[in-house]
Image (tube, rainbow, N blue to C red):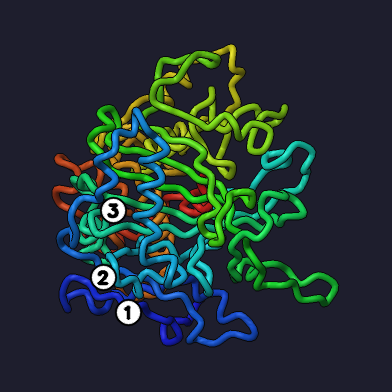
């Protein structure tokens, strides 16, 4: 049993009122301790002091028509995201230009936030994913950020950071979130990664000792990909615009962080478009063929040519994957089609998956918790996989009685029986013994593998 409560490095975040002072939430996974050669002053500190309302006007780049000039829109979004952050090495609490925040409850579990940068583990690459003939698999770790528009919704969700409320979750127009994705691959593996920004990260924290030799637990990670999502009502079918950049050393810039090539933009799933036919809600820079895609194991970035990043699952796409965000997660699909489907066979399963999901609508409205046969309604999470992951992690932490759940009550959102009330969550169970019985029936560990 973990006895880390006295050792946990609590972030400087403040929450909504002293009533929740007992609910202390760490910034990173303390289970693995401080890596050798570092001290507590080197630890990542999350920014979770979410505002009740946005602290800025709508981002100016949103005035650009992304359907007619997708690269200008995406570049404007990148400039907005990097302004004030690059100068402070993405320690967003130090940004004096505008406010940015981290997602709460991303620290627990094996893939949770690491010590130095707060990176979380993403889906590892597969053989031949990044380059034809590159048989290696590489770890991928990432960190995401939300502007004050998005953080104002987090303020509502995490008013009590130990008992989230996701009823009526809907991000306001103007929400911008971006993610930096890092890979273990080097320029030896992928020449276009030469001179990429590199962060040291505690990614080998759980590697085993082999023949008495300690593994290298802190290792260099290279910037591979930058993802951006914008809550924009001009995306009339989904409410969201997704874009991706890839690092490329041949971009002319003295600033390594600006050596980024736009990969593509998506504002929908092109739900009825068969492979080989033109897409109207997705655009990809086809000049990247041969570098990011175009070989037998990766003919395209996303399914049927839909927009995706090099680190992403080729069976899916940016918009479709995020559109599945809900709690509980879809028991049928998870977050992507689980079985490869031949491009010539556009089955009903893919028709069901590549739908345009409106904000505030659940992808799979009736689902099941893992290891349960009980059907329950799902909370829609408005395209936020970080909230989905945070809810899964907080429930697993409660199941293990990790601090603060050695003293705090089980969150209502983790209790299956609460979903069966009419209306849902109308009268949450208060009996802690019963709540724990419900909690322990779910296989929360099944939610641990990284999404993408």
**Disc 1 secondary structure class:** loop
Identified at 53% across, 69% down, the residue is: 114
Query: Nearer the N terminus, badge 1 or badge 2?
Result: 1
Q: Nearer the viewer, mark 3 or mark 1?
A: 1
Residue at disc 3, secondary structure: helix
* Looking at the image, residue 288 lies above or below residue 217: above
- Which residue occupies 50% across, 76% down? 30
Left or right, residue 262 beside residue 185: left
Nearest the eye: 217 or 134: 134
List x then y, in percent, for residue 361.
26, 34
Mark 1 residue crowding within 10 angstroms, few (<14) / some (14–19) / many (20+) = some
Evaluate if marks 3 and 2 touch, with contact meaning CB atoms under 8 Å apart. no
The CA distance from mark 3 to mark 1 is 26 Å
| In front of the other: 434 or 312 | 312
What numbered label is drawn on residue 413? 3
Q: Is residue 79 left or right of residue 425?
A: right
Contact, CB < 8 Å: mark 1 with mark 2? yes
Q: Residue at x 49, y 71 (%)?
A: 29
Which residue has dot 1 on it?
Answer: 12
Tell me which corner region of the image, top left, top right, bottom left or bottom right, holds residue 365. top left
Q: Position of residue 164 (x, y in %)?
A: 26, 58
Query: In 3D space, how far apart are the residues under numbered discs 1 and 2 (Cα atoms)?
Result: 8 Å
Q: Nearer the viewer, mark 3 or mark 2?
A: 2
Q: Measuring 29% from the left and 46% from the top, which residue is drawn there?
A: 61
- In this figure, which residue is indicated by the disc labeled 2? 49
Q: Nearer the viewer, residue 224 or 317?
A: 224
How crowded pointer 3 is (Cα within 10 Å; few <14, some 14-19, many 20+) is rated as many
In terms of sequence position, does the residue under pointer 3 or pointer 1 come before the other? 1
The tag earlier along the polypeptide, 3 or 2, is: 2
x and y, in percent, of residue 144 in the image? 42, 57
* Vertical position of residue 263 compared to residue 388: above or below: above
Q: Nearer the viewer, residue 342 or 167?
A: 342
């Amino acid at each position: 049993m973990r006895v880390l409560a006295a050792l946990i490095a609590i972030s400087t975040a403040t929450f909504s009122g002293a009533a929740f002072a007992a609910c202390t939430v760490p910034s990173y996974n303390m289970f693995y301790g401080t890596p050798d050669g570092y001290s507590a002053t080197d630890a990542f500190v999350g920014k979770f002091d979410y505002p009740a309302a946005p602290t800025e006007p709508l981002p100016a780049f949103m005035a650009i028509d992304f359907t007619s000039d997708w690269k200008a829109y995406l570049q404007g979004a990148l400039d907005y995201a990097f302004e004030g952050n690059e100068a402070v090495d993405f320690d967003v609490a130090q940004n004096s230009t505008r406010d940015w925040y981290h997602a709460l409850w991303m620290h627990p579990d094996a893939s949770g936030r690491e010590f130095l940068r707060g990176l979380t583990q993403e889906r590892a690459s597969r053989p031949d994913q990044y380059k034809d003939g590159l048989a290696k698999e590489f770890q991928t770790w990432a960190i995401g950020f939300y502007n004050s528009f998005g953080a104002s919704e987090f303020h509502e969700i995490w008013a009590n950071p130990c008992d989230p409320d996701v009823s009526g979750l809907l991000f306001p127009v103007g929400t911008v979130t971006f993610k930096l994705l890092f890979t273990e691959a080097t320029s030896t593996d992928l020449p276009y990664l030469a001179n990429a920004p590199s962060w040291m990260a505690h990614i080998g924290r759980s590697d085993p000792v082999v023949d008495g030799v300690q593994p290298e637990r802190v290792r260099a990670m290279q910037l591979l990909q930058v993802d951006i999502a914008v809550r924009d009502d001009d995306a009339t079918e989904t409410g969201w615009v997704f874009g991706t950049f890839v690092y490329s050393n041949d971009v002319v810039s003295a600033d390594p962080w600006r050596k980024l090539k736009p990969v593509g933009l998506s504002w929908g799933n092109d739900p009825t478009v068969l492979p080989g036919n033109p897409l109207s809600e997705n655009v990809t820079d086809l000049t990247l063929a041969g570098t990011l895609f175009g070989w037998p194991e990766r003919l395209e970035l996303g399914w049927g040519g839909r927009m995706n990043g090099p680190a992403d699952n080729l069976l899916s796409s940016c918009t479709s994957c995020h559109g599945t965000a809900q709690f509980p997660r879809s028991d049928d699909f998870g977050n992507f089609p689980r079985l490869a489907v031949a491009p010539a066979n556009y089955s009903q399963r893919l028709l069901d998956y590549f739908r345009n999901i409106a904000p505030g609508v659940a992808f799979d409205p009736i689902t099941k918790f893992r290891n349960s046969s009980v059907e329950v309604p799902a909370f829609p999470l408005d395209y936020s996989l970080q909230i989905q992951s945070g809810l899964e992690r907080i429930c697993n932490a409660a199941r293990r009685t990790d601090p603060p759940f050695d003293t705090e009550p089980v969150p209502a959102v983790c209790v299956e029986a609460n979903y069966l009330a009419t209306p849902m969550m109308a009268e949450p169970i208060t009996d802690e013994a019963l709540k724990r019985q419900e909690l322990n029936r779910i296989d929360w560990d099944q939610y641990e593998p990284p999404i993408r």
